[in-house]
Amino acid sequence: MRIAALLLAAGLGRRFGSRTAKQYLPLGARPVIRHAAEALLPHVDLLLPVGDAALLAEALDGLEKVHAAVRGGVTRQQSVRLGLDALDALPADRRPDLVLVHDGARPYVPASVVTAVIDALATHRGAVPCIPVAETIKRADAGLISATVPRHGLYRAQTPQGFDFATLRDLHRAHMHEAGGAGDLTDDAAFLEQAGIPVALVRGAEDNIKLTYEEDLMRLERLLGPTLLPRTGTGFDVHAFGEPRPLMLCGIEVAHERGLAGHSDADVGLHALCDAIYGALAEGDIGRHFPPSEADWKDADSARFLIHAGERIAARGGILVNADVTLICERPKIGPHAEAMRARLAALLRTDIGRISVKATTTERLGFTGRGEGIACQASATVLVR
Ligand code: CTP
Ligand code: MG
């Protein structure tokens, strides 16, 4: 029995209203849609994302079983149909028997919900995870309540919805020319219901929130929070002034008569911050991940080290809470560059600039930094991880 998942990500998120479409926003250290993909992947043989190919390739980079993305449509219904067409075009030995259709904006679907949907497909051609409506339901118009709707027998439908592949494909194709090709059914089970095909109801989960309005992002972040523990790491690094090469500090070039000596680009700020993050994760230090003996790292742009450290947080399912970097030198003056450094570090770590601090101090002309022989840096980082 082959199972494929369609992961929908072609929407514009008009109700959410962010510049980046909601499914690509970071939640913890990973994009919303990557959480969704990781939740589904253990249960399926193939995952086919529907949406912008470049954004999806970046967001889902490195995950196994992920097919190249197909372009979506104007409506969700159209996006699903295009995804089903792409699955249908696979060679016969890869075409699925069952398909799960999941909202890319729904990051935290519990494994129990996915397995309940798949299990129900042993006896039904469609299955939908649902939550019974708990509140009293009102109908209203223009701010005035007009009626109370009996809530008995009412449910809120979630995804992933599961189907016999051929059944869903044929129903979507049968309806594809309605509404000028832009039919707007917001879920897929509706086609089976209209056709009189029984659809099983399985238990959904309150945490299986669809990111729809801005406040949903806060709810999702709160869900992530208590399952994680805070851990703090520190890092320290020193490089001597030496060669006449560009001075790299915290990922940006700072105008100065001398650069720092070192195997890589000698960016003392990036190195200390990497070690703080590795320390917080208890994953060794920068030398373990990028041994100085390897020619590969000679003159390397240290930005790649920090990107790696950030990816380690993501791989652990964690969040960078904050990082604080202190550069120690008499010259150059760091103040004028601090904002650009914060922005660069935040970009490399894919986090908000508000979580990154860069500051500097002198040592009152004492010691090697005081004599202008080199630059030291100390950093701390706090992460939340499981
Ligand atoms: N979706 C899609 N193609 C569309 C519209 C929606 O693939 N043309 C996807 C969305 O990316 C989302 C899922 O369907 O993962 C659920 O849709 P919804 O929450 O309505 O997302 P948007 O349509 O993006 O948001 P809005 O309706 O607020 O514009
Ligand atoms: Mg929509």
Image: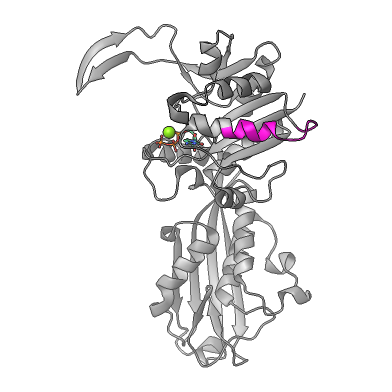
Choose between 182 and 373: the one closer to the eye: 182
Vertical order, 356 against 52 (above or below): below
Residue 328 image point, x, y percent: 50, 80
Quadrant for the C terminus, please. top right
| Location of residue 153 (image quadrant) | top left
**Residue at image x 43%, y 42%?**
12
| Residue 292 against residue 347 in the figure, above or below | below
In the image: residue 40, left or right of residue 55: right
Residue at image point 63% right, 20% down: 163
Residue for point 25% across, 10% down: 147
Query: Relative to residue 373, is residue 326 depicted above or below?
Result: above
Of 325 and 257, the residue lying toward us: 257
Quadrant including the N terminus: top right
In the image, taking residue 287 as reference, residue 212 lies left or right, namely left
| Furthest residue in direction right, as rendered | 93
Query: What residue span does the magenta drawing correspond to?
Result: 82-94
**Residue 236 location, x and y as percent?**
59, 72
Count of numbered tags? 0
Camera sees residue 116: no
Is residue 321 one of those drawn in magenta? no
Q: Is residue 83 magenta?
A: yes
Name the residue at 53% across, 24% down. 205
